[in-house]
Amino acid sequence: MVGNAERVRGSMFGLAYGDALGAPTEFLSYAQIVRRYDLPGPMDLEGTPAEVTDDTQMGLAVARAVIDARADAGAFTAERLTPLLVNRFLAWWDSPENTRAPGHTCMSACAELAAGRAWPDATRRGSKGCGANMRVTPLGLLDGVDEADRCGAAQLQAAITHGHPTALAASDLTATAVHALRTGAPIPELPGLLRAHAEAQREVYRGDWLGDDLWRGPFADTPEGFVARGWDECLAVLDRLDQAVAEGDRRADPCRITGAGWIAEEALATAVLCVLLYRDDPRSAVARAAASSGDSDSIAALAGAMIGAAHGIDAWPVAWSERIEYRAELAETSAALAG
């Protein structure tokens, strides 16, 4: 039986391992990747340390904000979490280590935050890039938070930079996937669980976390219509996921049906596909996610976070923990999230 602490550690380190495996392949074509690595893809980390990208850096930023919000056992609310997230995002934005091809949306929104704008004014309302959900893993690993607050916080951390309704829904769905696997859901059941969650949340606007103004704009005339647009796009990509799973092709580009992963819902779906294709082989799952024609580091980071939550830290080669960049921070935040 895999314990919670091992699952949390497996997920946080899995996020970083996938990120590091996918970084060298992110801007290669599928044919180039296959020629370089064969399949299932890159099976070992490169370099010492094995460098990660902004995916892991921002995942750690979210983790630290969440840990700080829970530090004195106070209520887990938007009022507590929002300034902590903003401060951590700004620290990342201004860091000399922020040299890993960070996403334009995250950078431009943070520039507005640094100029003193409130987050609803700073966010990029038209963006649903995968920067919204590649960093949300810690919220799926947090214990002692009910579903409504986990969903609200997952959407909030996305909304601070990515204000599109699909960015919010995909981030909520990603945290839900990590949470379900961490708490013992069988991997083959994941698509059905995600679909049920999306259908249940379809018209739930979490105003206590998002405020009263985010929904106002070009997408809908009501809060319910705003969120429904995001959930409908997620449900559509889950349809494509079902098609890809039914085909079960381990040699085709993982992005072929579920998408290249530059946008949030496609990053989630393509990562889930790789986890399903190699549900009993975590190392091959992240290698397969890294061997993809799209946003390989983000797809592999999400795949690593999910399958690491299912299998625990023993899923990964022991030697990797000594080589991965930010290993001390990953260990520290894992221990704090696990309680």
Image (cartoon, grey):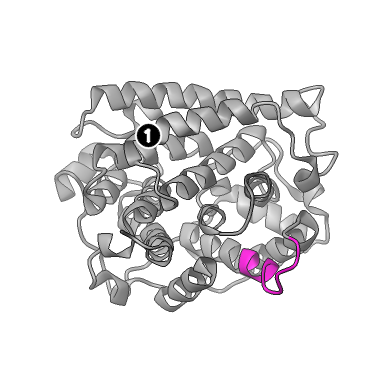
Residue beneath the point at 75% across and 26% down: 224
Residue reaching furthest to the front:
1
Residue 259 appears in the picture as rendered: no
What's the magenta region? 65-75
> Where is residue 56 shown, x and y percent of the image?
47, 61
Residue 339 appears in the picture as rendered: yes
Q: Is 66 covered by the magenta stretch?
A: yes
Residue 248 occupies quadrant: top left
* Residue bearing mark 1: 189
Left or right: where does residue 280 sit relative to residue 193?
left
> Where is residue 277 shown, x and y percent of the image?
25, 37
Residue beneath the point at 74% across and 34% down: 205
- Front residue (pair 293, 7): 7
Residue beneath the point at 43% across and 53% down: 182
> Where is residue 237 shown, x and y percent of the image?
47, 26
Residue 242 occupies quadrant: top left
Residue beneath the point at 31% across and 59% down: 1
For the residue labelled by badge 1, is the local secondary structure a helix, a strand or a loop? helix
> Where is residue 215 shown, x and y percent of the image?
78, 33
- How packed is label 1: few (under 14 Cα within 10 Å), some, or many (20 or more)? few
